[in-house]
Image (cartoon, rainbow, N blue to C red):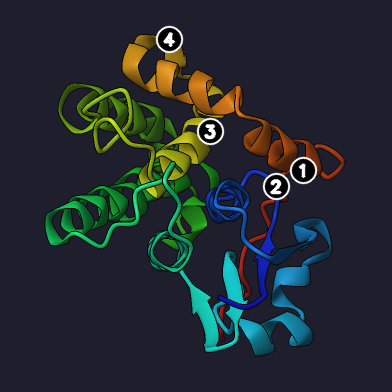
Amino acid sequence: MGHVTLYSTPGSCAVAAHLALELVGADYDAVQLDFSRNEQRSEVYLRTNPKGRVPALVTDQGVLTETPAILQFIAQSYPTPEMASLREPWQLAKACEFHSYLGSTVHVNYAHKTRPYRWADDEAAQAAMRAKAPQNVADCFALIEREMLRGPWVLGAQLSVCDVYLFTIAQWLPSAGISIAAYPKVDQLVRALADMPAVQRVMEAYRSMPPPVIIPERRPR
């Protein structure tokens, strides 16, 4: 696999792809977009990802967007003994199942707190979404803890890209007023990953930049 370039920003789901690239030892560059300057909606970046969001992974075959797709691509393109390659059909299906839940349910529930304007213009409706979001996120993590995290990793005995995705979204819990201590297995997974030098290198790279600034998308008139 040739050189790839990842576009991301601190505190976003794109951090999961960055962690995966570092853990598998990929040849890559990571470009951090400054959301406070609206760089994700610049003409230059929109030529790479017309969605105006992160992540985007530029490869020699083209551009990939959406965290689940990028994580699967990394797992299968950079096989290592330490990380599941997701080439066995059942293992791949279970990873896709987990990624789909994180992306379409957990992430969306959290976004109701930070970006409710995507779903409603009415201020009262937005306030109601913000108020309900923490409970919805907490319920999601309770389900993950109880039913989805086999232990010690999501898919069982072997580390996989599922774990870096969960690690990344678990970083959002404090801002939703949720203690990770309420989910012992998730907490243990996060601590185990946080102790890995590769993860520490990635997280350190983001400390110099602030998390994304919430700027409502311009709506067509």
Mark 2 and mark 4 lie on one chain; the one further toward the N terminus is 2
Q: Secondary structure at mark 2?
A: loop
Report the Cα–Cα distance between label 4 and label 3.
14 Å
Q: Secondary structure at mark 4?
A: helix
Q: Which residue is mark 3?
A: 172
- 30 over 195 or under it: above or below: below
Residue 41, quarter of picture: bottom right
Q: Which residue is mark 1?
A: 206
Report the Cα–Cα distance between label 3 and label 1.
15 Å
Q: Quadrant of the C terminus?
A: bottom right
Q: Seen in the image, is 112 located left or right of residue 53?
A: left
Callout 3–callout 2 Cβ contact below 8 Å:
no
Q: Closest to the observer: 121 or 210? A: 210
Mark 1 and mark 2 lie on one chain; the one further toward the N terminus is 2
- 44 over 127 or under it: above or below: below
Callout 3–callout 1 Cβ contact below 8 Å:
no
Callout 1–callout 2 Cβ contact below 8 Å:
yes
Q: Which residue is mark 2?
A: 10
Mark 4 and mark 3 lie on one chain; the one further toward the N terminus is 3
Q: Which residue is mark 4?
A: 181
Q: Position of residue 1 (x, y in %)?
A: 55, 75
Mark 3 and mark 2 lie on one chain; the one further toward the N terminus is 2
Q: Seen in the image, is 124 located left or right of residue 175?
A: left
Residue at 52%, 19% (x, y): give it: 191
